[in-house]
Amino acid sequence: MRDSKKPDLFDIESQFTEDERQVRDAVARFVDDRILPIIGECFENESFPMDLVPEMAELGLFGPTLTDYGCAGLNNVCYGLIMQELERGDSGVRSFASVQSGLCMYPIHAYGTDEQKQRWLPDMAKGKKIGCFGLTEPDGGSDPGTMKTIAKKDGGDWIINGAKMWITNGSISDVAIVWAETDEGVRGFLVEKGMTGYSTRDIPHKFSLRASITSELFFDNVRLPDANRLPGAKGLGGPLGCLTQARYGIAWGAIGAAMACYQEALEFCHERVLFGEPLVNKQHIQIRLADMLRRITTGQLLALQLGRLKDAGTMHHSQVSLAKWNNVRVGMDIAREARDILGAGGISIECSPIRHMLNLESVITYEGTETIHQLIVGRELTGVAAF
């Protein structure tokens, strides 16, 4: 008999391999046992649970699709399921792993030298070194082409000046993947913690992603050797390629947040008695729950097909945009619906929908706003760029 409490009306479970299910279940146990009991307090106190990083590394959650350097070499569906389960816990935890993997380890692996890979990737896989991704600037969120951070050649070195903003993991990072304008176009650099002229400042008083560290990065005549340049990254294609990796994970992660909210709303409706009977007996409640499941199922199928395309090497970035756009919107709408179903108690941090609802306000904005992804899809359909 089908378990009505699990959001899997279309038997998507049967589409996963045994390895994929094992990876998902291992991360799900970690989320249930280690993240969910503390994440409300972390959110309330604006703190990231750094003590969980070694356990995340032990599970192979950093750079899991990369080969060698201590990485797990999993397929992309496994990676998506990891992101789904982590965001079922909290968007901030998923963001930490997503930045470490897709925005930091990936460019070193894809664009870096052998020396850079050997120096950074093993320790990053173990969680001993943390990375951040410096692209967004105070005046150039959706338009990286207006980049004002400059890197100028000075003999065998580079001198970097500028600033980055809204950087996840910024102040706790050992290395920042920094994108700067040069005389030869945009290039990527490895700026290391402690370099003269490099400083960070955390952004306080956020009402979203509170269990995540968000920082500003400042570069005041930071000198670094040419050995810290990513030689394989040329032009905006370098950072945009990284964003494709991270956006892929978000498409799965947002469904995890939606699942958490749906599950809590469903359990509440079974337990809550109103006018003499449980809420689940009410037509209006059943319609709302059915609509939540419809959206989750659509998002799950979209993410799974995207993962299969990525594993086949045929995924296009516009497909990632469609999935990120759809699934984050699904997550936001379901979080708000669940919050409303929970009534007055739904605004309490003891309930997850209000936390997910606030977090997803950031997720729908970062790594390409909803509008940007709509226009990416529109360009693919029409051949016309309307940004």
Image (cartoon, rainbow, N blue to C red):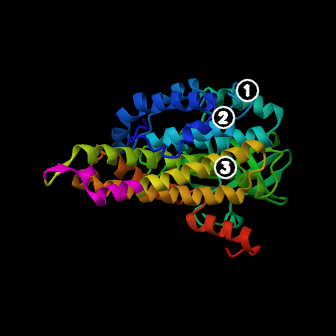
Q: Is residue 382 above or below residue 286?
A: below
Q: Amino acid at mark 2?
A: Gly
Q: Amino acid at mark 3?
A: Leu
Position in image of residue 376 (x %, y %) = 68, 66
Asked if labels 2 and 1 touch by Cβ distance under 8 angstroms, the answer is yes
Question: In the visual, does 315 lie left or right of 82?
Answer: right
Question: In the visual, does 5 lie left or right of 75?
Answer: left
Tag count in the figure? 3
Q: CA distance from mark 1 to mark 3?
A: 26 Å
Position in image of residue 214 (x %, y %) = 50, 49
Asked if labels 3 and 1 touch by Cβ distance under 8 angstroms, the answer is no
The residue under label 3 is 306
Magenta stretch secondary structure, dominant: helix
The residue under label 2 is 63
Question: In the visual, does 275 lie left or right of 137?
Answer: left
The residue under label 1 is 69
Position in image of residue 354 (x %, y %) = 34, 52
From which residue to which does the magenta span run?
276-290
